Image (spheres, helix red, strand yellow):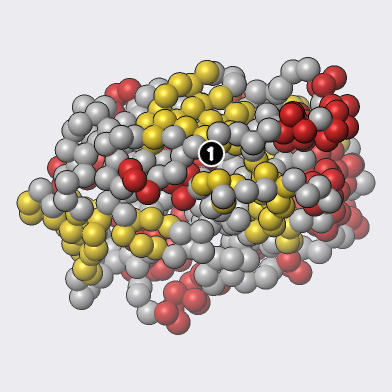
Amino acid sequence: MPNVKRRTVIQGLAHGLAAAPLAAAWPGAFAQRRKDSVVLGMVLEPPGLDPTSGAAAAIGEIVHYNILEGLTKIGVDGSVTPLLAEGWTLAPDGKAYTFTLRKGVKFSDGAAFDAEAVKFSFDRARDPKSTNKAKKALFDNISSVVVHDPHSLTLVLNKADASLPFRLGENTAVILHAGSVAAAAAKPVGTGPFTLETWNKGSAVTLAKSPSYRDAAKVRLAKVTFRFINDPSAQVAALLAGDIDGMPRFGALQSLKQFQADKRFVVEVGSTAGKGIMSINNRKPPFNDVRVRRALAHAIDRQAFIDGAQEGLGKPIGSHFAPTDAGYLDLTKMYPHDPERAKALLKEAGVATPLNVTLTLPPPQYARKGGEIVAAQLAKVGINAKIENVEWAQWLSGPFKGNFDLTIINHVEPLDYATAYADPNYYFGYDSAKFRGFVSQLAATSDAKEKARLWQAIQRQLAEDAVNAYIWNPAQVAVFRKGLKGLWNSSPIFANDMAAVSWS
């Protein structure tokens, strides 16, 4: 799903960069925060706190692994280990996973975690009315959830799925119990190391250490606050003033060298599973013509976008896979930057220029700054892109509901090709029986060579159909105060595992 983080623009930018010399000169402005608390800056504020019913990736940044947990856990290196499950076995045909659950685990409100809670969560996710963004990719393939006893159950699948342990480690598969689910968007109750203390809308979410957590003695932080700072200048000012201790996904990349030269800070650059794209409304003329979509792809200079909007931090991509994904295929040469070819394709499609379109941009810097670069590139081939800046809630109710021409967004979830492209109702409206056939074949095979072939076929099909203009795989840039340990330096999924964080 899109790099969906929500935020409120921090006011008072007159105190922004101008405050930096004062903060640097006055040691008291940077006094060490209590050793058992931390304040982190987040780019986007989530619309709710239930990742099983909301699409925003920003939800997982706050609750996943902190308040809510799943059967498995995805590590910073992408590895999968047991979490609420102690382990699992796979049937010979690959169509049934039997899980043994941890004993003695409770939700923070005292409810017992058991197989019935897992069954409730997964039956809810696969219900026809479910809004879980992994419904099609994961839960529709579960034919039944069979409870054997309070601590064991079997997921019976329609088709074999070797990726299921990984999928169960994503935030869409966290476990809730029936008594708390109705209020989960505002007050999630989970089995994790923290509980929700406060949510001041437009400002911050604060978590408190859960005294009932099974490994509470290992959790070093008593309090974690996530502050929402959308504006890049305000992010810089907050770090320099000591108002926040770090930003796991720093957005003000133009200021990176400043922090790299400041001995008070640590800067780490890692990888992500993100696919930064210019999404195209495939349902809407003239974008329903593949020649027009190919023209858009040829019009964009990927490297110029990465250099101008991302300070060179990122890699060009040619399909909806990240270089870190299994089976990645570099298809960037299919659509090299070629304005003349773009003009020719528009003419061939019978499109009269100038073509007037709307380019809708959500708040992140990559979209706002990158959108200006893209609009200038499109103008050179006869496409006048009117920029429309919107807040995150407007993006979710507009483009994400299919009401748009073009938009720029970072899809952060790993291997989300089925969620995004096998569902014709998804926001950009791609409808290809051939593509869906590849996805079905992939889900049904456990043969390594066949999986590799199908991964490549999936990528080539998306590129050939130019469903979207695939631009870049973002790097993760984390900036934090020296002495803060345990923050993830890469994002195989969008999460902040705060139980692993401490002050040295």
| Extreme residue in the bottom direction | 449
Residue visible at 41% across and 68% down in the picture: 442
- Which amino acid is tagged 1? Lys
| Extreme residue in the left direction | 149
Q: Check the image and report above or below for 201 versus 404.
A: above
For mark 1, give the secondary structure. Answer: loop
Q: Residues within 10 Å of mark 1 (few under 14, many from 20)?
A: some
Residue visible at 14% across and 55% down in the picture: 152
Q: Check the image and report above or below for 13 versus 41.
A: above
Write down the quadrant of residue 288 in the picture.
top right
Residue on which the image places disc 1: 35
Lateral position of residue 283 relative to residue 47, left or right: right
Residue visible at 71% across and 22% down in the picture: 10
Q: Quick check: can you spot residue 19?
A: yes
Q: Position of residue 335 (x, y in %)?
A: 77, 63
Lateral position of residue 461 relative to residue 361, left or right: left
Q: Position of residue 285 (x, y in %)?
A: 68, 39
Lateral position of residue 9 relative to residue 172, left or right: right
Q: Position of residue 58 (x, y in %)?
A: 54, 37
Lateral position of residue 428 relative to residue 385, left or right: left
Q: Nearer the viewer, residue 122 or 32?
A: 32
Q: Quick check: can you spot residue 176?
A: no
Q: Check the image and report above or below for 365 versus 495.
A: above
Q: Nearer the viewer, residue 270 or 407?
A: 270
Residue visible at 33% across and 23% down in the picture: 183
Write down the quadrant of residue 336 in the picture.
bottom right
Write down the quadrant of residue 195 in the picture.
top left
Q: How many marks?
A: 1
Q: Position of residue 428 (x, y in %)?
A: 58, 42
Q: Nearer the viewer, residue 148 or 158?
A: 148
